[in-house]
Structures are given as structure tokens and as C-alpha cells.
Image (tube, rainbow, N blue to C red):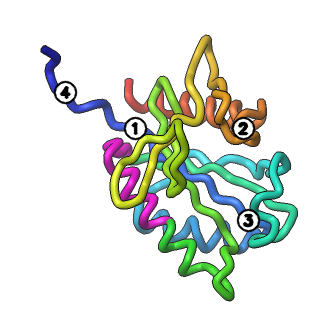
């Protein structure tokens, strides 16, 4: 029989995307008040592998990743997703999102995203929130799965997440 143990705490990583820089500034200011200090902020990354959000959010969308210094329990990700959904609604204009806020977490072996959409590879957490292992760490870097969002599968995104993993690795030593 196995022994129940608490898993290590993980690195909270939040992706923001929008086509207007002022929405990044507004959202991250609120998130820092709620979740604490950021210890890594990525450069802007393109979102050019899907047109899914264009109708609601416009074109020329760009993404930034923010890694939070305070480590979290994995079980907190559902509550964080519920909070970020409410923040998206608060920042919306005419019921259209102007910024997308996607929380996830990183362990040494994987990068997990929280979502409200159920799919075959997603695990239900609670209160309408699911988790998806978006990337796995293998042979020195993150690699994608067949279901990984196309942007996350790019070299640019994976290199950014590898850099966040290195911050996390040093943090938990």
C-alpha cells in the first residue's frame, strides 16, 4: 500500500495576452497584489498559430509569461483560475475580453495549465476547472504532446518556459 504524501510546491506561471500593452500593466498590477512578487517576466511573444481569439480580442495579439516568486500548492490552481476569470470579466469592455489570463504551474517534470474547457486529456479539479499537462520535461527541455496548444509547442515558448524552470529549480534547492 502506498503512503499519502504532500507533493512539492510548484511555481505559479501566468500567461497574459492582449493586443494592448496597457491591459498587461493593469492586469499584472492586480495579480501582484493578490499573488505576490514576480521573479521572471518574459518578453512579448507572438500569438500567430491560431485565430481563435481574433473575433473577441482583435488581431496582433502578444503574450507574456509571469512567474511568481511564492510557490503554491498544486491544489490552489483551480481557485487561481476562478479568480483570473473574474479579473478578465472586470477588465472587459462591452462584455469582450481585452486580456486573456491563463494560470498554470510548473514542477520540474511538467507545465500544467488550468482551463474551463473539458477535453479527453484534461482532468477535472473542482468548480468547473480542469487541468492539462501542456508540456513535459524530457532530455533537457520541455517537449509538447499531441494536444499542446500550437504556440506553446514553438521553440520560443518552450525556451521561455525552460528559463522559468531554471529559476524554479534554483529556488527549490
Which numbered dot is residue 148?
Answer: none
Q: Earlier in the sequence, mark 4 or mark 1?
A: 4
Q: Earlier in the sequence, mark 3 or mark 4?
A: 4
Using the image as rendered, state which of residue 162 and residue 109 is in the foreground: 109
Q: Is residue 124 left or right of residue 142?
A: left
Q: Secondary structure at mark 3?
A: strand
| Residue topped by disc 4 | 5
Q: Earlier in the sequence, mark 1 or mark 3?
A: 1
Q: Is residue 133 left or right of residue 148?
A: left
The correct choice, above or below, for 116 with respect to 86 in the image is above
| Residue topped by disc 2 | 157
Q: Residue at x 65, y 24 (%)?
A: 143
Q: CA distance from mark 3 to mark 2?
A: 16 Å
Tag 3 and tag 2, C-beta contact below 8 Å: no
Which numbered dot is residue 10?
Answer: 1
Q: Earlier in the sequence, mark 2 or mark 1?
A: 1
Q: What x and y, as percent, mark residue 77?
A: 40, 50
Q: Residue at x 51, y 29 (%)?
A: 110
Q: Residues within 10 Å of mark 1 (few under 14, many from 20)?
A: some
The part of the chain drawn in magenta is 71-84
Q: Is residue 138 magenta?
A: no
Q: What x and y, as percent, mark residue 99?
A: 66, 68
Q: Earlier in the sequence, mark 3 or mark 2?
A: 3
Q: Is residue 79 left or right of residue 2?
A: right
| Residue topped by disc 3 | 18
Q: Earlier in the sequence, mark 2 or mark 4?
A: 4
Q: CA distance from mark 2 to mark 1?
A: 19 Å
Q: Is residue 72 magenta?
A: yes
Q: Secondary structure at mark 4?
A: loop
Q: Residues within 10 Å of mark 2 (few under 14, many from 20)?
A: many
Q: Secondary structure at mark 2?
A: helix
Amino acid at each position: 500500500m502506498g503512503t499519502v504524501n504532500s507533493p512539492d510546491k510548484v511555481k505559479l506561471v501566468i500567461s497574459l495576452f492582449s493586443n494592448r500593452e496597457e491591459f498587461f500593466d493593469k492586469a499584472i498590477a492586480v495579480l501582484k497584489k493578490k499573488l505576490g512578487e514576480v521573479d521572471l517576466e518574459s518578453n512579448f511573444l507572438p500569438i500567430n498559430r491560431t485565430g481563435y481569439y481574433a473575433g473577441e480580442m482583435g488581431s496582433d495579439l502578444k503574450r507574456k509569461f509571469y512567474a511568481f516568486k511564492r510557490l503554491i500548492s498544486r491544489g490552489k490552481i483551480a481557485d487561481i483560475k476562478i479568480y483570473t476569470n473574474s479579473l478578465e470579466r472586470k477588465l472587459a469592455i462591452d462584455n469582450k475580453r481585452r486580456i486573456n489570463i491563463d494560470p498554470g504551474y510548473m514542477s520540474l517534470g511538467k507545465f500544467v495549465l488550468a482551463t474551463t474547457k473539458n477535453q479527453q486529456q484534461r482532468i477535472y479539479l473542482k468548480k468547473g476547472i480542469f487541468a492539462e499537462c501542456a508540456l513535459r520535461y524530457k532530455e533537457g527541455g520541455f517537449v509538447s504532446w499531441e494536444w499542446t496548444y500550437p504556440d506553446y509547442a514553438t521553440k520560443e515558448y518552450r525556451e521561455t518556459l525552460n528559463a522559468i524552470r531554471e529559476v524554479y529549480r534554483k529556488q527549490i534547492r
